[in-house]
């Protein structure tokens, strides 16, 4: 299969249809367990470690005005997500909440990748010609990996409050929850070579304790409940 960004007359071109797979992953780190004991007056005091725990989910809408979305707006069905057409705009709303007691640094990445009908990887530099990714403020410029297999859109680290620990740091959003919104446009210029491709969206959020951790080391962020 030869990939190219074609712009043919709509009457001469079949509509492209893609199958979309939507993945959502959350990664978090938990603080170390610690305890204080005192026997000065024969009183023992135990301090139990706080917790970091993320909860989240995603909602998907196709060709729906974002400003008009509310709790009554129907989400895209599996059938609709399996039949995306050139010109469609997919809105992805990701809600994340820190339900643990500890405040946390939070960093997220959004990755776009695709395979064709024969399960071959669609090169990332070709993929970016057919899909445009935006957030609520601007068109996002992603980074293509070294082997040209996917596009990564990275965010800036923020500070989420915990249910107990509340922060006033310059990066703090003064809330335990955050919503991320992405608009993914399947360009009308996409040609027949994009028929039947499988598009994978992967959102990963990492949290690591904020207090006593001025510069977070994201390599230390691990799943609280890893999948076996």
Image (spheres, rainbow, N blue to C red):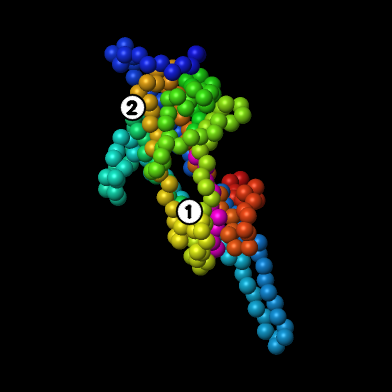
Residue at left 65%, top 47%?
219
Magenta span: 97-111
Coordinates of residue 156 in the picture (x, y in percent): 52, 47
Coordinates of residue 210 in the picture (x, y in percent): 58, 59
Determine whether, in the image, residue 163 is placed left or right of residue 68: right
Coordinates of residue 46 in the picture (x, y in percent): 64, 75
Image quadrant where residue 39 sits: bottom right
Look at the image and tell me in which quarter the C terminus lies.
Answer: top right
Circle 1: is it few (<14), some (14-19), or many (20+) Cα within 10 Å? few
Q: Along the line of sight, which residue is nearer the eye, 133 or 169?
A: 169
Mark 2 lies on residue: 87
Is residue 25 on the magenta stretch?
no
Mark in front: 2 vs 1: 2
Determine whether, in the image, residue 176 is placed left or right of residue 47: left
Between disc 2 and disc 1, whose residue precedes?
1
Residue at left 58%, top 46%?
227
Report if residue 195 is visible in the image: no
Is residue 99 on the magenta stretch?
yes
Determine whether, in the image, residue 85 is placed left or right of residue 206: left
Residue at left 62%, top 53%?
216
Mark 1 lies on residue: 55
Report if residue 186 is visible in the image: yes
């Amino acid at each position: 299969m030869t990939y190219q960004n074609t712009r043919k007359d709509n009457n001469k071109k079949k509509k492209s249809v893609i199958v979309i797979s939507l993945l959502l992953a959350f990664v978090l780190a938990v603080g170390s367990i610690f305890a204080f004991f005192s026997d000065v007056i024969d009183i023992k005091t135990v301090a139990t470690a706080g917790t970091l725990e993320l909860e989240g989910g995603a909602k998907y809408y196709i060709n729906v005005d974002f400003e008009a979305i509310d709790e009554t707006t129907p989400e895209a069905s599996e059938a609709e997500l399996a039949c995306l057409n050139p010109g469609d705009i997919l809105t992805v709303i990701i809600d994340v909440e820190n339900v643990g007691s500890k405040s946390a640094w939070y960093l997220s990445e959004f990755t776009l990748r695709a395979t064709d009908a024969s399960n071959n990887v669609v090169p990332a530099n070709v993929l970016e010609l057919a899909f445009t990714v935006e957030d609520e403020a601007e068109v996002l410029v992603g980074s293509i990996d070294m082997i040209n297999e996917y596009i990564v859109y990275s965010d800036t680290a923020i500070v989420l409050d915990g249910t107990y620990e509340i922060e006033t740091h310059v990066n703090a959003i003064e809330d335990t929850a955050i919503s991320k919104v992405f608009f993914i446009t399947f360009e009308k210029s996409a040609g027949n070579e994009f028929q039947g491709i499988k598009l994978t969206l992967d959102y990963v959020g990492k949290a690591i304790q904020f207090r006593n951790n001025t510069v977070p080391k994201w390599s230390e962020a691990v799943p609280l409940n890893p999948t076996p």
